[in-house]
Amino acid sequence: MTALARPDLSTALDPTYTVGYVFRISVRIDQMLVPVASDLQENGPTAAVVINLGTNDAIVGGNSAPAMASLTQLLTTVRPVRCVVLTTIGPFADDRGCSDVGAALNRRMTDLVAGDPRRYKLVDWNRFLSTLSSQTRQHYLKADLIHETPAGARWLAASDEVELHTCGTAAQTPMIQAPGP
C-alpha cells in the first residue's frame, strides 16, 4: 500500500518534512523489523514515522498472536521516535485470511492512541472504508478490496499529513470524509 501511495505521500509531505521510505511489497510486520531498525540506525534521529503495516498479516490469517508480537517489536524499535502515525487495516483483509488478525491489530492501534494521544496518531483506513457505500468505496479501493486506488492513496496521504501536524499534542482530528455525491 505504501508503494501505491508514495507519490501522493511525497506531494503531501514535501517540503514540510524530509520524507524517507522503508517499505517492501507484500510483507508482514515481522519482515519489516530489520529494515526499519537499519533505517533508524543509518539515518539518525527521526521526528515521526508513519506505519502502514499489518494487511499482509491479516491476509495470511491464522492466530493473531504472531502479528501482535511483531507489532510490539516494531513499536519497541521505533521507541526513540517522538510521533508514530498508525494506519489501520482495511475491513476486507480478515475476510481474505479467514481470521481476525486485522481486527486485533486495529484494536491495539486504537488502544495505543487512546493511551498516549501525544505520541500515537491514527489514520483509520478501516473506519473510513467501512463508512462508505459499496459504490463510493470503489473510488477508494481496488476490486481486490485490499489496495487503494489513486483516490484512496490521496486520502491516505492527506490523512497522514493531518495527523503529523498534530504530533506532540493531544488533539484528535476528525476523519477526512469522502466528497458527497
Image (spheres, rainbow, N blue to C red):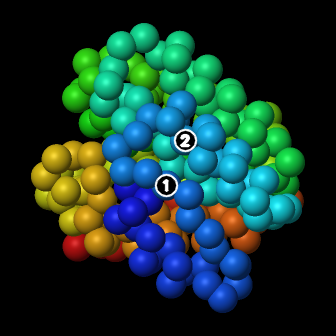
Q: From the viewer's perspective, tell me whether residue 46 is left or right of residue 97.
A: right
| Mark 1 touches mark 2? (CB < 8 Å) | yes
| Residue type indicated by callout 2 | Met
- The residue located at (86%, 48%) in the rendering is 80
- The residue located at (47%, 16%) in the rendering is 64
Q: From the viewer's perspective, tell me whether residue 172 is left or right of residue 152.
A: right
In the rendered image, the vertical position of residue 77 relative to residue 168, given as above or below: above
Q: Secondary structure at mark 1?
A: loop
Q: Pointer 1: what residue?
A: 23
Q: From the viewer's perspective, tell me whether residue 23 is left or right of residue 5.
A: right
| Residue type indicated by callout 1 | Phe
Q: Is the N terminus in the top left, top right, bottom left or bottom right quadrant?
A: bottom left
- The residue located at (52%, 79%) in the rendering is 10
Residue 3 seen in the figure: yes
Name the one closer to the observer, 168 or 60: 60
Q: Pointer 2: what residue?
A: 32
Q: Secondary structure at mark 2?
A: helix
Going from the N terminus, do you reach mark 1 or mark 2 first? 1
Q: Position of residue 173 (x, y in %)?
A: 65, 61
